[in-house]
Amino acid sequence: MKKLIVSSIILLLLSCSGCNKDDHRTVVSKLSSREKVKNACPEKKVIHIQPLGYVNAEYVNEVVSAVKKFYGYDCVVLPQVKPTDDIMAASQMRYEASKILDKYNSKDYVLILTTEDIACRTEKSSELGIFGLGYMPGTTCVVSTFRLRRTDGNLVPNAVLLERLDKICLHEIGHNLGLDHCLNDPRCMMNPANGTIRQVDRERIWFCDICMIHLKH
């Protein structure tokens, strides 16, 4: 049975003492890390990248590169689609992630990428802003860059935004592949954000040994 996983809930007020200084491209490019994931996912999959609204080509290319390097999957970039009123959240100020997943759910693997703000309903909030949402297991997930661009209200360097984007996208694909949130190692990319960008910045582009075992099954 599928369930929705809120990968990265973020509150309006964030505090971050600093970002992981490890260059994500260095981490991703380590052969041992890449080969472990690829060996755990021998079946070749194609991830369809669906831009929802205008998405900077740099963001799309970054996600394609990260997916290929980390999972070894090919990517197909689909034509941009326009956000529509039927996926708006109750406030009419942003989009509801679950509605996006329902609308674009597919038998193919689809990662919906948007710069628009997205939200979900939880037990404590009728509309809480999030980084991403995905089915577990399933084939569809959505990621927004909207809340990745700032720390404490200030714009972050582009390299930091791209690193965060890589982590959230790879995390969401992990949910589609059946991985739940990880509580084994705070550096593991499958950790829940627990309401703060700080956890995302703490993580590496890496799965812990326990998540790797689950990935193989």
Image (cartoon, grey):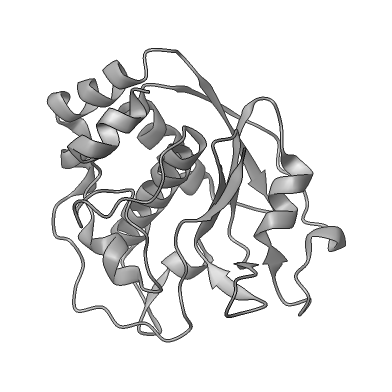
Q: Residue at x 77, y 56 (%)?
A: 83
Q: Is residue 26 above or below residue 184?
A: above
Does 212 sit left or right of 30 as displayed? right
Q: Residue furthest front?
A: 1
Q: Residue at x 55, y 54 (%)?
A: 133
Residue 158 position by quadrant = bottom left
Q: Is residue 4 above or below residue 104?
A: below
Does 57 sit left or right of 207 as displayed? right
Q: Residue at x 71, y 31 (%)?
A: 106
Residue 23: x, y in percent?
17, 49
The one nearer the camera, 83 or 170, is 170
| Residue 112 appears in the figure | no
Q: Is residue 44 above or below residue 54?
A: above
**In what quadrant of the picture does the N terminus appear?**
top right
**In what quadrant of the picture does the C terminus appear?**
top left
Residue 85: x, y in percent?
85, 63
The one nearer the camera, 172 or 179, is 179
Q: Residue at x 35, y 84 (%)?
A: 152
The one nearer the camera, 187 or 16, is 187
The one nearer the camera, 202 or 23, is 202
The mark tally for this picture is 0
Residue 209: x, y in percent?
19, 36
Does 82 sit left or right of 186 as displayed? right
| Residue 27 appears in the figure | yes
Does 188 sit left or right of 71 as displayed? left
